[in-house]
Image (cartoon, rainbow, N blue to C red):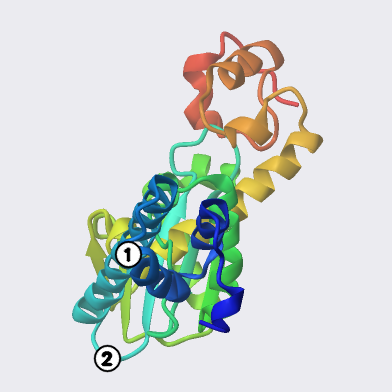
Amino acid sequence: MGDESLRPTTAREVVAILSDAPLDEARALIERYAEDPRKQVQRAVAAARRRIEKDEAEHERVNRLYELQRTLGGEGLIVGVDEVGRGALAGPLTVAAVCLPDEPQILGLNDSKKLTPSHREALAAEIADVAVAIGIAHVEPASIDALGMGTCLRMAMAAAIDDTGLRPDCVLIDGNPVHAHPLERCVVKGDAKIAAISAASIVAKVTRDALMTSYDEEYPGYHLASCKGYGSSEHIEAIRSLGLSPIHRVSFCGNFLETMRLF
């Protein structure tokens, strides 16, 4: 740990170094200061222990996502698939398909709904760096109105898988059977159980959120940057007041309109 003469001596110095130390160094520091009688130091030691325990628990949780992925997907190329925007009133249905290597594991992977926007964006950037391949597909509102959600979901998932450029040996899809791929296997709540599905849920969410934010400038007044096209009270009131924009799903919005005024 370096020259003994450079060791921190005051309680404040010890607290600072314990708080800032990387986890590997924190383990050695905990041993060093475990018997230090000063209360401030003991609180810092306890906090460092909790930080290490939290990190170990996260490694174990994420490792389970990768282990179940291999258990269900086998030894070949596995693609995870998830969608976002199924229940929105405006904007596309967006599907992502992601193939991850076994290593390095990406800490923080989870159902995108359980993550903050900033955490999702950071993870999406890491997924882009690590992934073997990523595929994206959008289905626009007019197609959803014309064909229905079931058909559009199947089309979008097939297109996203194709967009990866891979020939997967197994396709793991969040939810119930979709029949989007002959080698699909569906996992209920898979976005919290399977690494590649979690990654797909994050990529789909970040991609669609960015698109809806851009639409907020093109179609002002609908609060699209905040509601992302879903049925918030402000969005529904805007539909009643302004009518529908070209990116609204007519078949989803009839209950909110006395008369439909299309832009």
List the single residue furthest toward the left.
71
* Residue that mark 1 sits on: 173
Q: Amino acid at mark 2?
A: Glu
- Above or below residue 203? Residue 40 is above
Residue at (32%, 86%) from the top-left corner?
A: 169
Q: Position of residue 24 (x, y in %)?
A: 43, 76
Q: Nearer the viewer, residue 148 or 83?
A: 83
Q: Position of residue 220 (x, y in %)?
A: 77, 27
Q: How many marks?
A: 2
- Above or below residue 32? Residue 229 is above
Q: Amino acid at mark 1?
A: Ile
- Name the secondary structure under disc 1: strand
Residue at (55%, 56%) from the top-left corner?
A: 10
Q: Image quadrant of residue 33?
A: bottom left
Q: Local crowd at mark 1 within 10 Å, few (<14), some, or many (≥20)? A: many
The answer for how far apart the CA atoms under marks 2 and 1 are is: 17 Å
Q: Nearer the viewer, residue 175 or 107?
A: 107
Please report contact status of discs 2 and 1: CB closer than 8 Å, yes or no.
no
Relative placement, left or right, of 253 versus 35 is right
* Residue that mark 2 sits on: 75
Residue at (33%, 75%) from the top-left corner?
A: 171
Q: Image quadrant of residue 70?
A: bottom left
Please name which of the two marks, 2 or 1, marks the residue nearer to the observer.
2
Q: Nearer the viewer, residue 42 or 73?
A: 42
